[in-house]
Image (cartoon, rainbow, N blue to C red):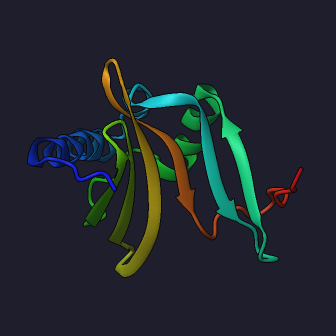
């Protein structure tokens, strides 16, 4: 089992600080610069099956414009992240988040796979249940 150093853990915190600041501003193009494409996107659909897609950069930008709009500022977004290093170059980050929309507190639980590139950390896979409405169910083989 790989045990990350304090500096490696800090590098993940720093990456998410950058990501969160860009998300707050609604800087979607810059968020896309922090990713590796094609990006794996995993969720589930209402009938209970998983759904998996690969997004291009353009598809990611379009989806983020729809979901993020002008940014996350004003949502009182609070996140607790738990990085789980598989190796020095691969880390799964589990996030528990709470945000307030129209006075209603909403909780989210999701995970991201970050990969170390020559330019630093980048997210490559996003996993979150419950938002695959209309997506086809995953198929084996």
Quick check: 8 left or right of 104?
left
Q: Quadrant of the N terminus?
A: bottom left
Q: Is residue 12 above or below residue 134?
A: above
Q: Percent x, y for residue 8?
A: 18, 42
Give whichever of 108, 138 is nearer the camera. 138
For residue 117, which quarter of the picture? top left
Q: Residue furthest front?
A: 1
Q: Residue at x 44, y 71 (%)?
A: 108
Q: Percent x, y for residue 125?
A: 53, 45
Q: Residue at x 43, y 34 (%)?
A: 28
Quick check: 141 left or right of 53?
right
Q: Is residue 51 visible?
A: yes
Give whichever of 1, 43 is nearer the camera. 1
Q: Is residue 51 above or below residue 106?
A: above
Q: Percent x, y for residue 139?
A: 87, 56
Q: Residue at x 52, y 41 (%)?
A: 65
């Amino acid at each position: 089992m790989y045990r990350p150093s304090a500096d490696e853990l800090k590098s993940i915190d720093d990456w998410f600080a950058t990501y969160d600041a860009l998300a707050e501003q609604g800087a979607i193009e810059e968020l896309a610069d922090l990713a590796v494409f094609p990006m794996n996107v995993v969720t589930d659909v209402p009938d209970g099956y998983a759904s998996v897609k690969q997004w291009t950069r353009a598809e990611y930008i379009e989806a983020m414009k729809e979901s993020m709009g002008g940014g996350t500022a004003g949502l009182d977004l609070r996140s607790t992240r738990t990085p789980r290093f598989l190796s020095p170059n691969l880390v799964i980050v589990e996030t528990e988040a709470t945000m307030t929309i129209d006075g209603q507190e909403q909780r989210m639980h999701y995970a991201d796979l970050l990969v170390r590139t020559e330019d630093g950390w980048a997210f490559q896979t996003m996993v979150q249940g419950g938002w695959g409405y209309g997506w086809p169910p995953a198929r084996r083989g």
